[in-house]
Amino acid sequence: MKIESLKKKELENYCHKYGIKVQSKNTKQQLLELINKDKFNKITNAIKQGKQLELLISQILLISEEYASQLKIQIDLRKEEMRNDDTSHYLIYRVLGISSQEGQKIDEYQNIGRFLYNYAGSFLEEIASLCLLFNNPQGKKTTVKDSFGKKLKTFEIDFLDGNDAIEIKWRDATTDGDHITKEHTRVKAIQNSGYKPIRVMFYYPQREQAIKIQQTLETVYKGVNGEYYAGEQAWNFIRNRTGFDLKQILIDIADQKTPEKS
């Protein structure tokens, strides 16, 4: 999981699990630095030995297993909670032609869908960043100051690769017009910090309004000499930038875990 989101105790457990020596007095920031240093050393050693692809695939597998485990826990907990839910609203479902049994399945899958969407997005964004890190161990997540907006003080850069400020999205289906304003401000803040803004989004939205938002964002990025990649172009960007075919790696893992019936 994304280590930045872990609490201090969770970070300590993470370090113990992977053999990273820590002290009880270490702060959360110090623990993060130790983890990142350990990751940097492992990657650079793998590169020296020509085993970076082998290590990358093993890391992606490990991360996928952690995400899958946490997702199952969340789904099981929510199903248990839903057993005690008030189902009086099924009356309205029935008036609209949906049986109580169908309504129960719809509510259950709606809840599962929220968890799945969030976990799928975080997973893909994390491993895409990992590919970039394996290509440039000096790269990192960072922030830039917001010199233009009033609501936010900083904007996060998912991966700073040299002078390229790369934002990674698995999908962006928003239809909120304010999203354009926020992104425009973000792009200007990145440019003002001396970086080139690059947006990488793996799955393009399918609804008309959301598509228009993305088309506008593409214009915003290219208007400041930035770059915008979506859909197959995003997968190609990662492959061309890093030399790792992330999409094929994921296809191979998926075929091993959940093979599709022909």
Image (cartoon, helix red, strand yellow):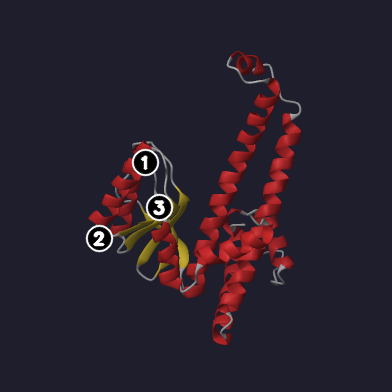
* Label 3 crowd bin: few (<14), some (14–19), many (20+), radius 10 Å: some
**Element assignment for label 3:** strand
* Label 1 crowd bin: few (<14), some (14–19), many (20+), radius 10 Å: some
Q: CA distance from mark 2 to mark 3?
A: 19 Å
**Identity of the residue drawn at 42% across and 42% down:** 206
Q: What numbered label is drawn on residue 155? A: 3
**Identity of the residue drawn at 42% across and 49% down:** 204
Q: Nearer the viewer, residue 51 or 91?
A: 91
Q: Decide: is 175 above or below 222.
A: above
**Element assignment for label 2:** loop
Please state, as top left, top right, bottom left or bottom right, where the N terminus lies in the image: bottom right
Q: What numbered label is drawn on residue 179? A: 1
Which comes before the other along the chain, label 3 or label 1? 3
Q: Which residue is most to the bottom?
A: 49
Q: Amino acid at mark 3?
A: Phe
**Element assignment for label 1:** helix
Q: Decide: is 113 above or below 103.
A: below
Q: Amino acid at mark 1?
A: His
Which comes before the other along the chain, label 2 or label 1? 1
Q: Nearer the viewer, mark 3 or mark 1?
A: 1
User: In terms of image quadrants, where is residue 47?
Assistant: bottom right
**Identity of the residue drawn at 59% across and 57% down:** 2
Q: Nearer the viewer, residue 50 or 233?
A: 233
Q: Nearer the viewer, mark 2 or mark 3?
A: 2
Q: Nearer the viewer, residue 165 or 171?
A: 171
Which comes before the other along the chain, label 2 or label 3? 3
Residue at the disc numbered 2:
225
Q: How many marks?
A: 3
